[in-house]
Amino acid sequence: GQNIDQPTEMTATEGAIVQINCTYQTSGFNGLFWYQQHAGEAPTFLSYNVLDGLEEKGRFSSFLSRSKGYSYLLLKELQMKDSASYLCAVNTGGFKTIFGAGTRLFVKA
Amino acid sequence: DSGVTQTPKHLITATGQRVTLRCSPRSGDLSVYWYQQSLDQGLQFLIQYYNGEERAKGNILERFSAQQFPDLHSELNLSSLELGDSALYFCASSAGTGSYEQYFGPGTRLTVT
């Protein structure tokens, strides 16, 4: 079967660093996406990892370990506007991308 | 603005009815995806089209159908609607398939009463 697991909710403080984990077990793997989704809005693309390692993009970084079926999204210098759901999604090959249920992040002052 | 448009933005209808949701992809994108997102739920993949052809199917009910037209816009048809079909329906598009990032439209909020 296909399985993508993320924590349901996380809370962090403005200015801090937070790491959102994602583990996956899928029948195939071509790459892993992270999307951000504010309540009631459309998801927006953050990153796409194909190879192992850390990719940094401004305040956001994403890490992938294919052998462990594991990824994380690191958010630095948290801002109130970072309060949103963060969706991990796996491109399983062919034409399918499967989304996890998402992690709702609350940033408090 | 992602460049993906969806109409209508909101739709309220009664159980047993049929509705059509419309999506226009970003200029140049050949793939269109449909997703359903119920309250506090993750994105459920429904179906994908690439250049007019169905390429992948997810958890799409038999009461639901979709198609992609020669001009690449797509329609999702939902029939015999039930209360549980109330959800946000997103359309996304991408340049190709699989490893391309998807650009999401603003969604259609369907309420079945």
Image (cartoon, grey):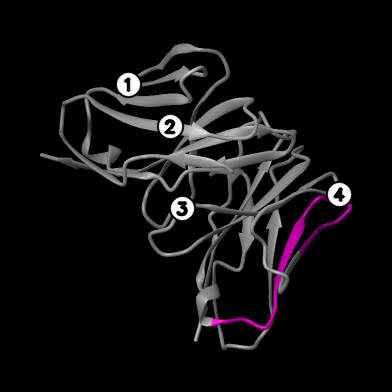
Q: Where is residue B7 in the image (x, y as percent from the top left)?
A: 63, 65
Q: Distance between the residues labelled 3 and 1?
A: 25 Å
Q: Name the residue under label 3.
A: B42
Residue A85 picture location, percent across and down: 36, 45
Residue linked to disc 1: A59
User: Magenta part of the protein: which range?
Assistant: B66-82
Q: Are marks 4 and 1 in contact (CB under 8 Å)?
A: no
Q: Which residue does the image show at 67% across and 44% down from the upper left? A: B93
In the picture, the disc for residue A23 is 2
Residue shown at 48%/25% (left/top)?
Answer: A69
State the CA–CA distance, disc 3 to disc 4.
26 Å
Q: What residue type is labelled 3?
A: Gly
- Few, some or many residues within 10 Å of mark 4 (<14, 14–19, 20+): few
Q: Is residue B80 above or below residue B72?
A: below
Tell me, yes or no, if residue B2 can be seen here.
no
Number of the label disc, if any, that sits on residue B53? 4
In the image as oriented, which residue stretches furthest toward the left?
A109
Measured Cα–Cα span from mark 3 to mark 2: 16 Å
Q: What element carries label 1?
A: loop
Crowdedness of circle 3 by 10 Å Cα count: few (<14), some, many (20+)?
A: some
Marks 4 and 1 sit apart, C-alpha to C-alpha, by 39 Å
Residue B7 horizontal side relative to residue B69, left or right = left
